[in-house]
Image: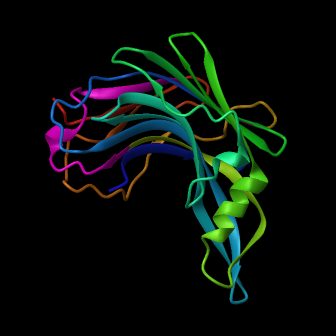
Amino acid sequence: MAWVSAAHVVSDKAITYLTATWEVPKAPSKDVGQTIFLFPGLQASAHVLLNGRTHHISGAAVLQPVLGWESSSGWTMENYVLANAPVPNDEVTGQVGSVSVKEGDNIIGTVTQSGTDYTMSFQINGGKTYSTTVGLAAIEKVWESTLIKGATLQGSMVFNEAVMVLEEYKVNDCSSYPDTSGVTFYNLQAMTSDVSPVNGEWTVETGLAQDPKCDAVKAVIQSPTMDSGQVEIKMAGS
């Protein structure tokens, strides 16, 4: 699978700052070899020329300070950039790898833009900040390499969508999610280049598939605002 529950906001301008705070939940009580990801992120849109026609593509790339769980490593935090394929480590600055965290730890995850560079960072319990920076050109290069033959990127990618996401792989029943009723992303802020809140509100992203279908797994908008928003990702683990 992939994304199974999410909230998002799409801006009419580039989003240059996104931050969210959340706590590490209980681990799944059932180990079936699953992988769980929870993260705030910025997604890019792009225009592609193919056969003389221009096509708009959303979700072309995502920048994410991501909380992940696997049975072999437990909960970990990592900065990750994906453009249909991972951006190679030699194209990023300050790649920190996985940092172990535990249930109850307080996480602040942030994505910022400065010029053509994007920095993902996370802070654990108010301590050290772990930052990773990648240039837009490197992201676009990887993404273009995944396009079908004859397709070319027109102009530059624009990171204009903020997301709060639950992503899973190999969950085989509803009890395989983390053993919690939900994870709340709070103190949400999304800003544009003129240092003003994004003109929009958090909404539930529709059309995401779930297999297995778990009615309890869903995003709930507790506060839709861009300067102090709050989104809960409901779970089915307990």
Where residue 194 sits: x, y (%)? 82, 35
Give the residue at the far right of this rendering: 115
Regarding residue 11, the answer to whether it shows in the image is no
Where residue 22 sits: x, y (%)? 45, 22
Judge by depth and name the residue closer to the eye, 130 or 22: 130
Where residue 100 sits: x, y (%)? 43, 23
Regarding residue 143, the answer to whether it shows in the image is yes
Q: Is residue 170 left or right of residue 174?
A: right
In the rendered image, the vertical position of residue 128 relative to residue 33, given as above or below: above
Number of numbered discs visible in the structure rendering: 0
In the picture, the quarter occupied by the N terminus is bottom left
Give the residue at the far top of this rendering: 126
Please check the rendered image and state whether residue 190 is part of the magenta-colored stretch, yes or no: yes
Question: Quarter of the image holding residue 36?
Answer: top left
Where residue 185 sits: x, y (%)? 45, 27
Judge by depth and name the residue closer to the eye, 75 or 190: 75
Please check the rendered image and state whether residue 133 is part of the magenta-colored stretch, yes or no: no
Residue at position x 19%, y 33% from top? 237
Residue at position x 50%, y 44% from top? 8
In the rendered image, the vertical position of residue 81 relative to residue 106, given as above or below: below
Q: Is residue 223 left or right of residue 61?
A: left
Residue at position x 61%, y 14% from top? 128
* Colour theme: rainbow
Q: Is residue 12 left or right of residue 41?
A: right
**Residue numbers of the magenta segment:** 167-192
Judge by depth and name the residue closer to the eye, 170 or 217: 170
Q: Is residue 217 left or right of residue 144?
A: left
In the picture, the quarter occupied by the C terminus is top left
In the rendered image, the vertical position of residue 207 relative to residue 53, given as above or below: above
Residue at position x 68%, y 85% from top? 150
